[in-house]
Image: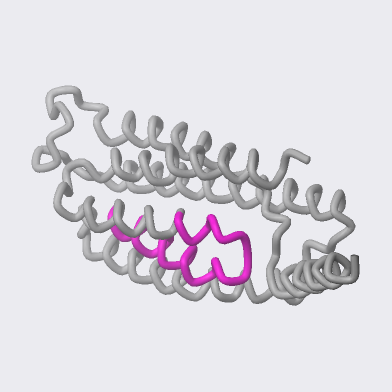
Amino acid sequence: MENEKYLKDISEIKNIMDKSSRFISLSGFSGILAGIYALIGAWLAYNTIYFDTTTLGEYDNLIVTQPMIERLFIIAFTVLIASIITAVVMSAKKAKKNNDSIWNASSKRLLINFMIPLASGGFFILFLIEKEMFGLVAPLTLLFYGLACVNASKYTIGDIRYLGITMILLGLLSTWFLGYGLLFWALGFGVCHIVYGSMMYFKYDRN
């Protein structure tokens, strides 16, 4: 009986230490919704880029105009803001349910470690857009987002690490198929978010 009590105490101490060092209130369902937003955004972007059906998806035949760039930026920004708002709202709801705070030392560390690679990549991608090097935008968004997930994963649910690794692999693979960047973008930010979000939802959220 005493051994069982010690094991239970050790388990409780481990859980307390884990909660104090990791932000575990990330919502899996918000990942699913973010994936859906990304797929809708990819569809809108496809209609924006390939509005001229004579290109038949051929990257070399595309004519990139200023209005096209502006519309793509609006689509991407809208998807990003919608995903962030959804993640914050649903994670706050989950944190409240678990009697936890969404803004604590763990979430601060998570945000800082997530934003360092992401912000660095964002500025670099803006530089590429200015130089009209559009073919590398999709691969690098996947790559830097994946690096951000891996970097932040030690402060949250471990599944985020595997999401990040998947994004990195897709980003690297996408550099070999520059004409299919939008497809890889939809696969990464859309399908992967839905898949990993579903895994997190059934693993952590359903209780």
Q: In which quadrant will I find the C terminus?
A: top right
Q: Quadrant of residue 29?
A: top right
Please give the name of the residue rendered at 66% of the width and 50% of the height, measured from the top-left corner: 87
Please give the name of the residue rendered at 38% of the width and 45% of the height, measured from the top-left corner: 188
- Residue 104 visible in the displayed image: no
As for residue 157 lying within the magenta part, the answer is yes
Please give the name of the residue rendered at 51% of the width and 44% of the height, measured from the top-left corner: 196
Please give the name of the residue rendered at 37% of the width and 39% of the height, measured from the top-left corner: 186
Q: Estimate the x, y position of residue 166 in percent, counting from the top left.
A: 37, 53
- Kindly report the secondary structure that dominates the magenta region of the rendered protein: helix
Q: In which quadrant will I find the N terminus?
A: bottom right
Foreground pick, 113 / 181: 113
Query: Relative to residue 85, is residue 67 drawn left or right?
Result: left
Q: Estimate the x, y position of residue 103 in percent, counting from the top left.
A: 78, 67
Query: Relative to residue 135, is residue 190 drawn left or right?
Result: right
Foreground pick, 98 / 175: 98
Q: Estimate the x, y position of residue 119 in percent, counting from the top left.
A: 47, 70
As for residue 68 lying within the magenta part, the answer is no
Q: Spot the residue most to the front.
A: 1
Query: Relative to residue 35, is residue 3 drawn left or right?
Result: right
- Residue 187 visible in the displayed image: yes
Q: Quadrant of residue 146?
A: bottom left
Total of numbered circles in the picture? Answer: 0
- Give the extent of the magenta segment: 139-162
Q: Spot the residue most to the left.
A: 60
The correct choice, above or below, for 162 with respect to 16 in the image is above
Q: Quadrant of residue 123?
A: bottom left
Foreground pick, 136 / 133: 136
Query: Relative to residue 172, is residue 119 drawn left or right?
Result: right
Q: Estimate the x, y position of residue 170 in percent, counting from the top left.
A: 30, 51
The correct choice, above or below, for 141 with respect to 51 in the image is below
